Image (cartoon, grey):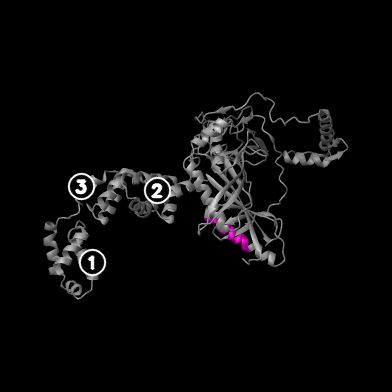
Amino acid sequence: MENTGRKKVITEDDVRYVARLSRLRLDEKDVTMFRGQLSAILEYIEQLNEVDTEGVPPTSHVLSSMKNVFREDEPGVSLSPEEALSNAPEKKDGFFKVPRIIKEA
Amino acid sequence: MSNKYETVIGLEVHVQLATKTKVFCGCSTAFGARPNTQVCPVCLGLPGVLPVLNRKAFKYVIKVALALGCDIQKTVKFDRKNYYYPDLPKNYQISQHDMPLAYDGKVTIVAEDGNTTDIRVTRAHLEEDAGKLLHDPGLPFSYVDLNRTGTPLLEIVSEPDIRTPEEAHRYLVTLKQIIKYLEVSDCNMEEGSLRCDANISLREKGAPGFGSKVEIKNLNSFKAVRDALAFEEERQAGLLDDGEKIVQETRLWDEKKNVTVSMRVKEEAQDYRYFPEPDLVPFEVRADLVEEMRASMPEMPRERALRFSRQYKLGEKDVEVLISEKDIADFFEQVAGCFDKPRVVCNWIKGEIMRHMNERGTDIRGLNLKPGDLAKLIKMVDDEFISGISGKDVLEACIETGKDPAAIVRKKGLEQVSDEGALEGIVEKVIAENERSVTDYKSGKTAALSFLVGQVMKATKGKANPKLAGEMLRRKLG
C-alpha cells in the first residue's frame, strides 16, 4: 500500500495479496475493479482521521458498558456426529474428509 | 560444542486447561472420544453463533499468572488470528495478541548443584485449541476431528534466557510441576495436554544481538526437547565453524533418527491480520478476583521443599523426590500425620510405593492406597510385629485388594514370632542341621550368622523376628 501524503492508495498487488489471504481467485478484470472499490472505501474511512483522538484510549469493543460476560464450566448439548457432519461435502468414518494438506513424508 | 559460541534458547509451551467444557462453548473436553462427537455450532464455526467465555478457564490463567509472578492485565480483550487450515473451521483462532492476560513473570530453575536461575516469562495468554488432523498414508486425503477445537489453551512464552538444553529441560520440568500443583492441567504430553516448541540460535560469546534462530517442532517429550536442542546446537556450531550462515527456518525433530530436518516450506512472513474479537466483550480483572485466586493457591513446590526439610528434617534429595508431585507430597504428609517417623515413611514412599507406581505405570492416586493403611502397615513393621519382607507382601496385597493391612496380616498369619519359646525348637534344629556354618561362625566368620538367621526365617516362612533369631543363635553358639 502506498502512502501518498494523507491518502492511502491500494495497488493492484495489494488486491492480489488480500485475495490470496482470503483464498479468492481473481482475474485481471476483478483486480482492476476491486482496486478501485477498495480505494474508494479506504478514502471514505480516511475521513475518520479528521477526528481528534488525542488522549482517547483505543476501543476494542463498541459495547463499552457491557463487560465480563462469562458462562460457567457446565456441559451443554453437543451435536450428534450425523448432524455435525451433515454439511460436509465429504466424510469418512466420522471424520471430515479434506484434500491432503501435508506432503507425504 | 566448541566454547566459542553461546546458545540462546526460548520455549513456547501450550497447556490445555483442565476445564470440563471448552473455552467458548459447553462441549466436553474429555480426551479420546469418537471423532466429532464433542462439537456444536460454536466450535464448528457455523454462521450466527457467539462465543461465551468459560469463567473457570479465565480463573485458571490468573492462578498460573500469580504462580509465575506475572503482572495481570486490568482489562482483557481477545483477538482474531486469521489463518486457513482445516483444523480450525472458523478460519480464525480466538487468541490474544497485543494484550496477553499475563506478562513479565519468571520460572526459577534449580540446577544439580543447587544454584538457582530465573528464566523470565514474556507472556501467558488464553486461546482456543485447534482440531486434530490425520493424514491418509496412501491416499491424497486428510481427516479432521474437531473434538479438540475450542479446548482452552494457555500459551506460555519464555524470554530467550535459556542457555543449555539441560536448562530447557529443567525449565519444562519446573513449569509442569508448578502447573500440576495448581491443578489447572494434567500436563499429559502423551495426550497432548502439554506441548512445546523450541527456538534456538547461537552467537559468538560476548557478541551483542542474536544469531538467526531455528524453530523446532514435533517435540513429544521433555527428553525430545533436550535431545533436539543438543543436536541443533552442534549442527549450528558446525555450520558457523565452516563459515556458513544459519537459515532461519522451522525444523522437525525425528525421534527415530535423532536429527532435526528442515520442513522445507517456503518461509513467507505470516500475515495473521489480527484484530480485536468483536464477538466477546471486554473483561475486567477485578482485584477481588485476583485475591480470591491468590487465596486458593496451594503451597507451591519451592515453599513446600523448604518446609519439608525444616519440619520433617529430611535431606535435600529426599525432599525433592517427595515434592516432585503435589499428590506424592500430600500422600506423604497424610501418612506422616498418622505415623510420626517421617524418615521411615519417606523411605517407604521412595522405595516400595514408587516401585509399585512404576510397575503399574500409574500415579500415586492410581494405587488406590489409603494413607492410613500405609501408616498402619509401616507401624507393624517398625514395631517388629511383622517382618520387613512380610511388610512388602502385605503392601502388595493392600494395593491389589484395598483391604485393611491388619486383616491381611491376620489372614496370611504373618504375625512375626517374637516369642523365644516358640522359636527355641527351630533354632536348635537349624544349628543341628548346619554344622558347617556353625563351625565357620565359631571360627570367627561372622557372616555365617546371617546364613543361619536366613535358615530360621525359611523354616518359619519369614515369620520369625530376625533380630531375635540372631540374638538366640549368638547366645547358643557363643
Disc 3 secondary structure class? helix
Q: Earlier in the sequence, mark 3 or mark 2?
A: 2
Q: Quadrant of residue B104?
A: top right
What's the chain of the residue with tag 2?
A: B
Q: Which mark is residue B311?
A: 2
Q: Are marks 3 and 1 in contact (CB under 8 Å)?
A: no
- Considering the image in quadrants, where does the N terminus of chain B appear? bottom right
Q: Quadrant of residue B428?
A: bottom left
Q: Amino acid at mark 2?
A: Gln
Which of label 3 and label 2 is nearer to you? 2
Q: Is A5 a magenta residue?
A: no
The numbered dot on residue B411 is 3
The amino acid pointed to by label 1 is Ser
What range of the chain is rendered magenta? B223-234
Can see residue B256?
A: yes
Residue at (29% x, 53% y) in the render:
B392
Badge 3 density bin: few <14, some 14–19, many ≥20, Cα 10 Å: few
Left or right: A93, with B359 as reference point: right
On the image, numbered disc 1 is attached to which residue? B450
* Disc 2, SS: helix
Res. B186 in view: no
Cβ atoms at labels 2 and 1 below 8 Å apart: no
> Which amino acid, mark 3?
Lys
Dot 3 falls on which chain? B
From the top left corner, tell me how far across and down residue A88 is, in percent: 60, 35
Q: Quadrant of the C terminus of chain B?
A: bottom left
Residue B229 among magenta residues:
yes
Which residue is more in the foreground, B438 or B404? B438
Image coords of residue B346 (percent x, y):
36, 52
